[in-house]
Amino acid sequence: MLNIRLTLLMALLGTCIFNSYASRTVYLDSLLATVEVKASKYPTKLAQTGKVVTVISQEQIQRSLGRSLGELLQESVGISIVGARSAPGANQEVYVRGANTGNVLLLIDGFPANDPSHISSVLDWNLIDLGSLERIEIMKGGQSTLYGSDAMAGVINLVTRKSGSSVHLQVGGLGTHAESFQIQKNSQSFRVGLAVKNFQTKGFSAAADQKEKDGMGQQNIRVNLGGAIGKSADWDLFYQSEFYQANLDGGPFMDDRDFTAKASNHAFRGQYHRQLLKGDLYVRLFHEITHRFFRNDSTDVPMNAWSSFSESAYIGLNQGIETYVKYNLPYQIQSIAGVELRNQSTEQTDFSISSYGRYDSPALIAKLANIQLLGTYFTLEKHQTDLWGMEIGGRFNQHSLYGNNLTYHVNPYVYVMPQGKLFTNYYSSFKAPSLYQLYSPYGNQALNAERGQTFEIGYEQRMGQFYTRLVGFQQNVQAGIVFQSMNVEPYGRYENISQQKTKGLELETRYVWKGFSAELGYTFLDGNMQQRLNGKDTTYSSLIRRPRHQGSLRVNQTISKKWSSSIYIQYVGTRADYYYDDASFQTKEVALSSYLWTEIQTSYTLSSKWRVQLLWKNVLNQLPQELYGYSGQPTNLQISLFGRF
């Protein structure tokens, strides 16, 4: 069966490469020159920045109907989403350039999206609906000068759709179905939109070598309002409500029939924008609250389970206000000056029942478990057309517990040869301790921020239908926060005792000709972590669950005016994972095998408004293992019907 699938895959790949029906030629140099991103907090042309920025377009998102946000981001060079190809509802760990999870800042329409109740302050990615997005902007490197805490390895900005009305219906393998619609009405003075999504899947067993299916349901509601105020000002309000519920298993190779997780996120975001004589003024505020609830009932108790019943509840509150001014100075210099205040708090309860009776963990309450973080920043940017450019900036941060710290960046670049650009970047960055690391029973209120330094050097070349970018980077993290065991109660706490060094290469190449395009990506990583344990310095690889080598190829072909197809192949190299061995009472290392992930996608336009799309995932059915003892997504086919109005 594998040989048949492999033969089919190679035949379709050959068809895509050699079949090029008439379609107008698209030149990448003109395309990239007009794409705008907000790497500097205001729209900037992609060709006019020295930062490493990647844009996932609406076309790429639409091509990914039937996939999750994590599955799509897994395609990106330098990014690994552990859990994206595991069972539905699995915890998704986001690694950018090998940095630890929690070292990348998630933005939604430019607003920070955090869950302060999480051990790393990250929002659960299972809450996010990919179909609601217009585009995704990925900014790599330390971005703390403009975006503050957590932006040590990069920033991922999810830009939601605010134009057009549409409907999407999906059905497919693993008992999956989804229904969504969006209505958007815009006029010169007012705009209003509503989007609703329901997703359900029966899934497959989260634990490896088990048969019971672990399914998931997801629901999303989004409302946006906006309008003009005179000729020089406008406003926007957003409300977003996201839910999901999932079945979980008890651990590696351990089935559990009554372990469930539920989560919700409610977010209000608002922005006021006014055009000034020589710039723009922005005022932004946000308020979001996240609930997470886990229950492991007593109707099914796995063998070797520590408890027969457990229940955990987490609430995270994330609030903030920011104002900044973009001002045009003489000599084509643009400046940004801003101030941002964030407030975060959490409430957490947890109890379990075992043969020893009931145990309640010390509760966290928002009155005590909270922090405030104030940041003031300033940047200058100079772009000399077709010659050179530079951005410099700094940020002064004031934390309500650990005090003050400073971050800065320098981003010079020069244009060389026709359509070539050589750039080098230096960033300093930081990540504030999470509320759990500060206030939990294992917390330490004397913790300082983790500090990062990133150096990049790269070259990109655009030439007609061809584009390539090669980047080398190194990131050093000092005062890293890790859990250190103790011989007395509480038998461990968090300390600033680790140092991490990660270096690597990223290669991206794209070629477009008529109806044909090909995208090639490769990532190499090497990293180690050093920490002091029991009075001794210990060094080990920091690439836990992260591959040293990862490469991908996507080939797209427009076969006719109505029909297009694509093939995607990704190689994920071997990875190291750790698990606790009950027999020896020790943590042991295990190697996760490399695998080849393959997809075939085809789309056919039925009319000017309707399109049908087929996505065959994991064509070779290699069953990837992203975590030791847990299953990978089997081969499955998803069919989507998409309409625009």
Image (cartoon, rainbow, N blue to C red):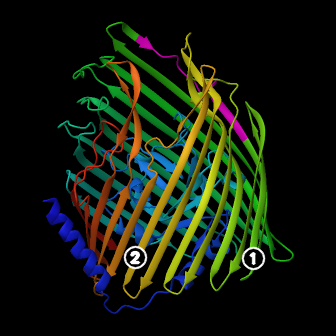
Which residue position holds label 1? 388
User: Which quarter of the picture shows residue 194?
Assistant: bottom left
Compared to residue 297, the image places residue 280 above or below, namely below
Confirm whether the magenta stretch covers residue 480: no
Position of the C terminus, as image quadrant, is bottom left
Kind of residue at disc 1:
Trp
Residue 596 left/right relative to 293: left
- Chief SS of the magenta region: loop
Residue at image coords 26%, 20%: 298
Q: Secondary structure at mark 1?
A: strand
Residue 420 or residue 142, whichever sits in front? 420
At a point 44% along the width and 34% down the height, the residue shown is 292
Write down the residue under mark 2. 518
Q: Quick check: 311 above or below 561?
A: above
Q: Is 371 covered by the magenta stretch? A: yes
Q: Check the image and report above or below for 560 versus 617.
A: below
Q: Which quarter of the rendering shows the N terminus?
A: bottom left
User: Is 449 situated left or right of 463 in this image?
Assistant: right
Q: Amino acid at mark 2?
A: Ala
Q: Which residues are magenta?
A: 359-373
**Number of residues whose C-alpha sits closer than 10 Å to that of mark 1, classed few (under 14), some (14–19) or many (20 or more):** some
> Which x, y percent locates residue 271?
64, 58
Task: Identify which residue is drawn at 43% across, 43% down.
Answer: 545
Q: CA distance from mark 1 to mark 2?
A: 30 Å
Instruction: Please tell me which of labels 1 and 2 falls first in the chain.
Output: 1
Position of residue 173 in the picture relative to residue 315 (left or right): left
